[in-house]
Image (cartoon, rainbow, N blue to C red):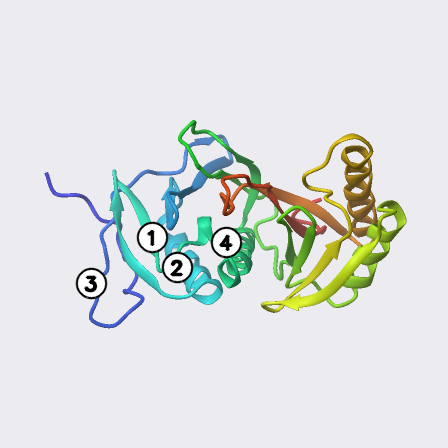
Amino acid sequence: MDTPSYPGTPAPLYPGVAAPSYSGYPAPFNQQVRVCCISLNESDKIRLIGTPPELTLPIRQAIAGSWGPIQREGVYSGVPEFKLLGNPWYGQGIEAVNSRRLITAILRTMAQCGWNLIQAADVSKKERDKDSLFFETSVVPDVGQVDMFSMSFNRTDRIRLIDAPEFVIPIVKGAILMQWKQGINMEQKYHKSHEFKLNGNPFWADGFEAVTSRVMLSQILAALRAQGYKLYSSVDISSGNDGHDVESWVFRRIGPAWS
């Protein structure tokens, strides 16, 4: 049986490459609320599960704008799948930064299209699996500009701010210094992100450090909340170079569509 295609399938991202056809898995709904899922798979794949067909093009554009070329686009068990060039879910160096940009771009695009995140969840027991992102339709359909940035925790001692407004950097620095008494060893630009290298090992901690690292993170959350930013998602997107991973945070400015 031929796979049915959505009406008005968008044009391909690259000239000369045929646009794939997608079978229809409509977003499940109850009354006025619809729910869909975007899953992160293997080291380089994104699948759109139950997303309306009109979201495929803006998500494709978000991927291309934040990560770069899409190696292949097709259908996986009846749902759209993007296979990216490189390995965003196993990234090191610039890929580790750009993978956070990618997730933030997808979350921002979904919000701009009227879909807010319900939860990022690990629903697979496969080794080195990643989160699935579940969305619901917003009660405020026109959200306008969506202000987001991400924060990643790297190695055992580093915090990176990725695409954060400039005024956020000293606020986060102040929160770190207020609660992490070992202090900051170094600040630097890391592939266009702002990186703090802390003294000690807050993300591989025991005893006193295990407690104070959580106090420090709580202080960061409180400081950003005072500026109108709230934690929007905590996402497992990287296996790390040793198989140990720490989730990355995405912050969103509160507003009528989300608070």
Q: Secondary structure at mark 4?
A: helix
Q: Is residue 139 visible?
A: no
Earlier sequence position, callout 4 versus callout 2: 2
Name the kind of residue labelled 4 in the image: Ile
Circle 1 sits in a helix, a strand or a loop, which is it? Answer: strand
Q: Is residue 47 shown to the viewer in this render?
A: yes
- Identify the residue under disc 2: 60
Mark whose residue sits in front, 1 or 3: 1
With respect to residue 65, does 121 lie above or below? above
Q: Are marks 1 and 2 in contact (CB under 8 Å)?
A: yes
User: Disc 3 and disc 4: Cα gap in Å?
Assistant: 23 Å
Q: CA distance from mark 1 to mark 3?
A: 14 Å
Question: Quadrant of the rendered structure where residue 119 is?
Answer: top right
Pointer 1 with pointer 3, Cβ within 8 A: no
Q: Which mark is residue 82?
A: 1
Going 30% across and 60% down the picture, which residue do you hit? 71
Q: Are marks 3 and 2 in contact (CB under 8 Å)?
A: no
The Cα–Cα distance between marks 3 and 2, rounded to whole angstroms, is: 15 Å
Q: Amino acid at mark 1?
A: Phe
Q: Earlier in the sequence, mark 3 or mark 4?
A: 3
Q: Looking at the image, which is closer to me, 72 or 215? A: 215
Q: Residue under circle 4?
A: 106
- 1 and 4 marks in contact (CB < 8 Å): no
Image vertical order of residue 234 relative to residue 108, above or below: above
Q: Is residue 236 left or right of residue 216?
A: left
Cα–Cα gap, marks 4 and 2: 9 Å
Q: Which of these two is toward me, 38 or 219?
A: 219
Q: Secondary structure at mark 3?
A: loop
Whole-angstrom CA distance, mark 1 to mark 4, is 13 Å
